[in-house]
Amino acid sequence: MDPIKVDFTGKGKSSGKKTVIIPPENARLKLIISIIGTVIFAAVAFYIMLPPLNIKAKELYYYIGLVIASFIALIFITSKALTKPEYTPYVKKVAVVPIVLAVVIALVAGVGVLASSVFFRARSYSELITVDTNGKFDIDIDETDFNSVPKLDESAAMSLANRALSDLANENLVSQFTIQSSIPQINYDETPVRVAPLNYASIIKWFTNRTEGLPGYIIIDMAAENTRYVALEEGMKYSPVDHFSRLLSRHLRFAYPTFMFEGSTFEVDEDGHPYWICARIDKTIGLFGGRDIIGAVLVDAVTGESNYYTVDELTNDANLMWIDRVFSAQILVEQYDHFGSYRSGFWNSILGQKNVIQTTEGYNYLAINDDVLLYTGVTSVTSDQSIIGFVLINQRTKEAVYYRVNGAKEYSAMETAEGLVKDYGFNSTFPLLVNVADEPTYFMALKDASNVVQRYSMINVKQYNKIKTVGETLGECLESYINVLEEYDIRVNKDDIDIPDDKNDIQVPEPDNGEKQKQTVTGVVEDIRSAVLDGGSYYFIKLEQNNAYYSIKASASPEVVILNKGQNVQITFEGDEKTIIPAIKLSVVE
């Protein structure tokens, strides 16, 4: 019997006839195997991708598309259509339903994108946030208490937290953990702090420590510039850096399969118990547009117990007032930019640009009434170096107030502050907005290459090219700034300003100025440590030949800032040998 001849090109005489469909051997079994394989793939992909089961989540569409593609691929493989093209019509027939499903999903997503477009919904985007545009800086913002003003930015706080890991040495865990990469600012005991949760140093360290969990966290006091390690009675079992069922995002997905989340923030309650604040997102414009926070899930970092609260509950429930960060800085800045761009419609934001404004390149945080407020400058879309005002937005309630002030952009102020100490090469932190004599003022810390604060600077927002000061301590900087304000006929009620005495609870080593003779010692540096004491930066140097540390203030010998282990130095000091010896001078010996 002659074999059946089938023309698969579509160009033969039979091209107008019905296509002959040849199923592969054991076609039904292979179809079942493909379906089972797809189900297994879908389960594994869901476990890894964790898409919200929510029609407003783009991740769900990507997930469904991937599952459909996996089914078609498995059909091709099991039927051997890749090597035997005569089975291709069969595969096409089987794949019709999933392909139609994919097309329908793509159409739904396409319509959703159009319905969410700012081109059609500009006004809705501008109304995502309500802004009080009549803010009065001198009335709304109290005189800043400089005894509690945060002096560090996140990178400096991270450096302090990493040094604080030495507190784990007594537990023989110092090499097991690192600091997690993001440590947002919160208020704790009415003090601006950053709370740094620990992270497993590697996957191996996770295996060896997972039973006990993460043993604690580090509190960085942004005002006092010191750290404290808090050991937990029971370790944290749930975090964004954990694995398998204890991975925070996976734990949330299986508990709240339809919720869309916007990351997580680590906070501690009034008793110091750790929680993850996981903000829930909704798309309020069309299908995919208008990101907004409608609530948050509080996850106990130790037990994994979770509870969901709406924004109204988070705003009004007295038991939840300890939560500082519900709305992320990214969402607040995004919504304010929509407000500034689209208040007068889409075309105006592109063509006329009447009253179109936008936020500046960065932001910082203010602690007011035990809340954390996001601060960012506001500028016109054509302005390069100046602001026309600034906005404060409460990260718990989303209350936003705009203050009209003409002045320097934050990065311009940073450049000015760095110019005041250009000989040292210090870098400025992003400015913090403070109130001095009812004058909006940029306050910045100036750091060396080791992220240690060396100076402080204050620059008047409105008269940034004239009223600018720098000081070795915060008190010195503030006093100098007040004097310059008075020079420019700005009235200052000094009784309302508490000049910091720049003291803290740490005893600062002072040189003994008695009758003892000066001594010198030369040797190779074995160890270097640093600390901020009495408002200044001190370095502690240990030489190879003895166990004592020589303490010296950075301002006394600036080259100590770039000193490295292994260098040969000469240290001048006076006094008796003891554990910490105050030094007078340090110089590198070539």
Image (tube, rainbow, N blue to C red):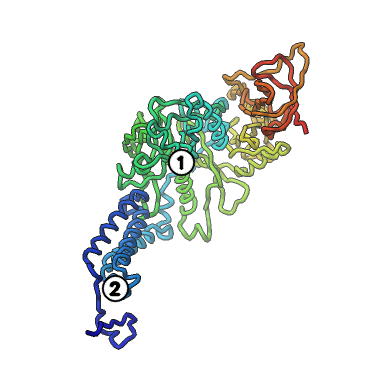
Q: Residues within 10 Å of mark 2 (few under 14, many from 20)?
A: some
Answer with the quarter of the image where residue 560 lies.
Answer: top right
Question: Which residue corresponds to the image point at 53% horizontal and 47% vertical from the top-left?
Answer: 359
Q: Residues within 10 Å of mark 1 (few under 14, many from 20)?
A: many
Q: Is residue 441 left or right of residue 62?
A: right
Q: Is residue 147 left or right of residue 116?
A: right
Question: Which residue corresponds to the image point at 55% horizontal and 26% vertical from the top-left?
Answer: 226
Outermost residue toward the top in this view: 515
Label 2, on which residue? Answer: 87
The one nearer the camera, 370 or 448, is 448
In the picture, the quarter occupied by the N terminus is bottom left
Taking the image as drawn, is residue 310 in sight? Answer: yes
Number of numbered markers: 2
SS for dot 2: helix
In the picture, the quarter occupied by the C terminus is top right
Outermost residue toward the front in this view: 1
Task: Find residue 400 and name its label.
Answer: 1
The one nearer the camera, 319 or 407, is 319
Q: Nearer the viewer, mark 1 or mark 2?
A: 2
**Of the residues shown, which amino acid type is indicated by label 2?**
Tyr
Find residue 439 and report its horizontal and vertical position in percent. Answer: 60, 34
**Of the residues shown, which amino acid type is indicated by label 1?**
Ala
Q: Is residue 160 left or right of residue 35?
A: right
Find residue 384 and report its horizontal and vertical position in percent. Answer: 61, 51
Taking the image as drawn, is residue 478 in sight? Answer: no
Q: Is residue 69 above or below residue 413?
A: below
Find residue 132 and report its horizontal and vertical position in percent. Answer: 46, 42
SS for dot 1: strand
Question: Which residue corresponds to the image point at 43% horizontal and 51% vertical from the top-left?
Answer: 126
Q: Is residue 361 left or right of residue 98?
A: right
Q: Is residue 300 above or below residue 279?
A: above
- Mark 1–mark 2 Cα distance, whole angstroms, equals 64 Å
